[in-house]
Image (spheres, rainbow, N blue to C red):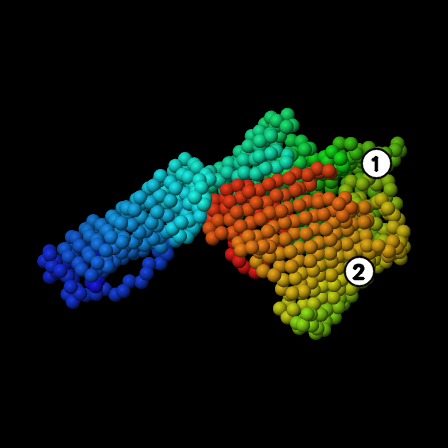
Amino acid sequence: MTRFPVPSTPQRLLRILTTVVAAASLPNYVLAQAVLPVAPPIAPPKAAQPTDRDAPAEISAEQMTGRPDRELQLDTKVEIVRGNTTITADHAKYHIVEDEVDADGNVRMTRSGDVYTGDQLKLNVDAGEGFVTHPTYKLLRNNGQGHADRINFEAEDRATVVDGTYSTCEGPDPDWYLRSSRLALDTSRDVGMARNTVVYFKGVPILGSPQMSFPLSDARKSGVLPPTVGATSKGGLEITVPYYFNIAPNRDLTVYPKIIAQRGLQLGASARYLDPSYAGETRIEALPSDREAHADRWAVSSIHTQTLTPGLTLNWNINAASDDNYRTDFANTMTGASQPLLLRDLNLTYSTAYWTAIARTTNYQVLQDPITPIARPYDRLPQLNFTAARPDVAGFDLALDSELTRFWHPTLQRGDRVYVNPKISYPIIAQGYFFTPKLSFHATRYNLDTVANPGDNNTPSRALPTASLDGGMVFERDAKFFGKAMTQTLEPRLFYVYTPYRDQSALPNFDSGVADLSFAQLFSENRFVGNDRISDANQITAAVTSRFIEPSGIERARVAIGQRYYFAQPQVTLGTAITDSRSDLLLSASGMLSQSFYAETNMQYSQSQHQLDRANYGVRYQPGPMKVLNLQYRQDLANDLEKSVDVSTQWPFAQRWYGVGRINYSIKTRKIAEGLLGMEYKADCWIFRIVAQRIPTATLQATTSLFFQLELNGLSKLGSNPLAALRSSVPGYQNINQTNTRP
């Protein structure tokens, strides 16, 4: 084997002549290994290594003939290495001045990690231009591979496959491949562009296109996305052909025309942008002349946030739809099947270290349920908030909440409300205990447009002080939890609140309601949400919590019990008055009983009625990747809601086959309120999914959707995408195309 260093242009001729003068004078001299110095071994080229045009070419062969200053004939075990390009062949001719290689016989070229083989190769090594005949190829970045009649190399990072195939499947007989008359591979932009293309799956043509583009990596690119096909009970067959515009690394636009068999052509667009000072997304859908509704249908959704100056931000969240039935007729679109209130919110916020000021306007579009009408919330036009907080001022914590709001409603009483709520507390915190006395004062005044009865005051007001004491202790001990050493805590806590009674029956109710009882609400000073009602209180809350904590600090289990006791029955009410001397008893428990088993329960027990008003019990079993089983039982007797059982799972049931499903079963009506059932199959280079989903859209109404998806790794996804439905319906669901890591 003879190894011969050939310097690159322009030093090539000078170095050859000075090192091998004797050989250069004999044009037909056979160069033996003993005559020329042997170059040191060349390390294999690294992937994505940049071309070094000044690097010398390293040439080796069993036999070399010719003139080293002009042309070398190489035979048997030929190897030419230049920068990140390596060529091997049975025979080759190297034109030194032109830096060109003509090779034939078992040709193999590796360039930046990509591998090409063929019968004959011609390549200008410096420019990266040439061709190879009857080649096979394999790309490093995404395992893309195929064969062709010819590959033309147009530059180091561009090649055109002529009458060839492309697939990311291994082996000579791939499960899927595309065949194209001309396939341009641009590794600098990570884009493949195929013309006159047919996609084959299991030998059957499934998609044809005059032009198709696809990524050679995970980078985004512009082009026509694969069509999606689905069906719903409200619209029938749906076919969407999206086009993606990769405007910039931080901006894109997707246009998605959709043919809905029973309704017509729906046009949609989604624009996203992300900058250091602002970001957002806007979506628009329009269906002119809906054949079912005999009307124009549309929906808009826009979210935006922007930093105007340091501390000053602008935000909006705007949603709108053409009619009340939009969410039921188009359950899989932006409005969402279970979202009857479409928010429109615009706010300007200025924040400093100790205070925040907000100016906003808010209203809602109500998509009414035909069976159970929904109350329309008040519009806030405008709402001005000012909050401030300063901790540790001579040991005191100071805070202030204030608001001025204009409430508007098309049919109900309207007016202005202003309130100021200063607070002062003195927290005493030490190792093992804490104690916090607190005083606050809530002053409210209204300016009403109308009053219920002649002579009523249209500027009512209210002023209420509140005093509270919050204290607790933390005890610790060494313990074991399922045989493992833990630290167990015992944390008793008492919370006392006193607020005097004020008659508030003459005040309007713009935004107040009774808060659901929870552990957080047990330690709240007001039983109501909103600011139109302030509960009178002479009460104490007692609770105790015990936790099991690992040495690493991870909480493995928690048990808590708490109850509120009334020294005097509250007189301010909304709805049902409180007649008991104590609230319902709350119990909460949760824990990771093992690495794969988690359980949680929350109960609200009425001691006067001797019944569980609310309860939910849930367990999750997740022993490994793509294996999860969730069981949950809920009941809410306090609000006359039915009991329900919710079961969801993702589980392999055969080799490469995974089942997914969810059933939300109403015990009261003996019907499935919401359901999902599907299967997934994972091959080496493709995935198939079929999923059916039933979504409640209104009282006594539901929409059923059917998803089919064929995911060809490295090319695209064909069909409708069910992944969002799977993630929302099955907690703990994992994409089977991702790396198998433990959840």
Residue type, mark 2 in image: Gly
Counting every numbered tag in the picture gives: 2
Comparing labels 1 and 2, the label whose residue is closer to the camera: 2
Q: Is residue 445 visible?
A: yes
* Residue 446: x %, y % from top left: 80, 40
Q: Is residue 409 left or right of residue 204?
A: right
User: How far is the residue under mark 1 from the one under mark 2?
Assistant: 42 Å
At mark 1, the secondary structure is: loop
**Toward which corner of the image does residue 237 lie, by quadrant?**
top right
411 or 660, which is in the foreground?
A: 660
Along the line of sight, which residue is nearer the eye, 689 or 523?
689
Q: Is residue 729 left or right of residue 244?
A: right
Three-letter amino acid code at the position of disc 1? Asn
Q: Which residue is mark 2?
A: 562
Task: State the residue at coordinates (66%, 38%).
Answer: 703
Q: Nearer the viewer, residue 322 or 427?
A: 322
For mark 2, give the secondary structure: strand
| Residue at 11%, 56% in the rendered image | 28
Residue 709: x percent and y percent? 53, 44
Residue hosting label 1: 458
Answer with mark 1 or mark 2, whichever residue precedes in sequence.
1
Residue 358 vs 557, above or below: the answer is above
